[in-house]
Structure formats: C-alpha cells, structure tokens
Amino acid sequence: MSSPMSASTFLGALANEGLTVVQVGDWRTHNRNHKGPWGPVNGVMIHHTATRGTEATVRIGRDGHPELPGSLCHGVIAKDGRIHLVGHGRTNHTGLPGDDVLRAVVAEKRLPSANEADTDGNRRFHGFKCVNLGDGEDPWPDVQLDAVEKAAAAICRHHDGTSRSAIGNKEWQSGKVDPRGLHDGLRARPESATG
C-alpha cells in the first residue's frame, strides 16, 4: 500500500462511498502518534466491540479505558450504518501479530495462522470497530454490513488494494475472535466493492 491519507482525504474517501459520517470532536488530531510512526498503510482491520449502544461505544472508541488509552480505532460503525470518526493516525487497535501475517497482507496472499507477536500493526492499518456483542447472536443489520463493506472498499481503493487488504482482527492476532459472525461472510458477498 502506501503513505497514509490526510484526514481530509480519509473523510472524502468515505463520503465518496455514500457513507454517513459523524465527526467526533478533534478526531483529525486524536491519535497515538507519540508512540511511534503512522504508516505505511497496508490495509484496514475490522473488529467487533463486544459492547451495546452507539453513544457508549463511540466514547470507548475515542477515549479507550485505563488499560488501553484511546483512540482505539479510526471509526466506530453503528448498527444504523453511521460511521463515527474518533481518530486519525496511529490508534490502539491491532495488537501484535507475526511478521509473516504482515508479509501476506502486503502481498495480498492467503494469510498464515497468527502464531507470533512481534510486529507493530497500529502503524499499518486503519481500524473500524463495529457495534456488536460478538456473541454470535447479536445481529449484523444489512445497513451496518453495507457500511463496513464500503468503508473497507474506500480505503483499499485509495491504496490500490483488494479485499485481501481488509482483514479481521482474528486473522491478525492469535487468540482474537473478532469480528465474530461478520468477516468471512462479508468478504464473500458478491457485491463486494473491494474486489
């Protein structure tokens, strides 16, 4: 992929997909860049939040919690399909995978099992957290699925990537299960705009 988008380009890419975007506070400068560089960008990572309710989830996505300071993602995708932008730049969302997983994402090849924890992913991926309990029973409304697909497509398209550049957290880091009930089916959707 390539150099990170500016905040304005990121906002424009989402808007060009017809997405409804809610800008939360100082999202353009809210990040963890003081912990390390942002970029090059290699893709987009999708998560579920294990929370209920948009307002509380957006607050957590923006502010984090005592063990993990925010911003915890770039955007929170609500059940109604709105994307709440809470950060831009490096955010605390990926955890650490092995470098073999990163190499596969960069090459857009089949991902190996995540079995190491030695690579900084926070600098390399846009992150979207989707409001869902992740219990396998909480539904994924079509409008939310469409927003996830379009947001991922916007980033992949900007960076000349394909759907292989859009991954779930469970594909990146061993022991993660998210986004439970979403990602495999989303990638297989025939109307997928990410190729």
Image (spheres, rainbow, N blue to C red):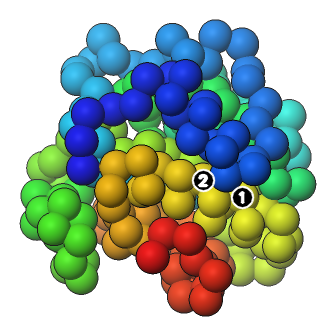
Pinpoint residue 66: horizontal percent, then vertical percent. Answer: 54, 23
Residue 79 versus residue 145 in the image, above or below: above
Return the x and y of residue 122 as percentages of the image width and height: 33, 38
Residue 147's tag is 1
Classify 48 as above or below 34.
below
133 relative position to 188: left or right: right
Please name whichever residue, 112 or 43, is drawn nearer the observer in this view of the structure.
Answer: 43
Q: Which residue is drawn at the image coordinates 33% and 56% (left, top)? A: 160
- Give coordinates of residue 137: x percent, y percent: 79, 80
Q: Is residue 167 visible?
A: no
- Looking at the rendered structure, the number of numbered marks drawn on it comes to 2
In screen coordinates, is 187 left or right of 49? left
In the picture of the structure, the residue carrying the numbered disc 2 is 151
Tag 2 secondary structure: helix
How far apart are labels 2 and 1 at the CA level? Answer: 6 Å
Check disc 2 and give the amino acid type. Ala
Residue 119: which disc?
Answer: none
Who is closer to the viewer here, 8 or 187?
A: 8
The answer to whether the residue labelled 2 contacts the one labelled 1, judged by CB atoms less than 8 Å apart, is yes
Please report the residue visible at 51 percent of the width from the left and 23 percent of the height from the top.
Answer: 7
Direction from residue 22 to residue 92 in the image, left or right: left
Up the image or down, 126 lies above or below 27; here it is: below
Q: Position of residue 6 (x, y in %)?
A: 43, 23
How packed mark 1 is, by other alpha carbons closer than 10 Å (few <14, some 14-19, many 20 or more), is: many
Residue type at mark 1 is: Ala
Question: Which residue corresponds to the image point at 34% horizontal and 49% vertical from the top-left?
Answer: 159
User: Depth check: 157 or 52 in front?
Assistant: 157
Q: From where the camera sits, is residue 169 visible? A: yes
Left/right of residue 32 with respect to residue 152 in the rendered view: left
At horizontal 24% and vertical 82% (from top left) the residue drawn is 110
Quarter-wise, where is residue 185 in the image? bottom right
Q: Nearer the viewer, residue 74 or 174?
A: 74
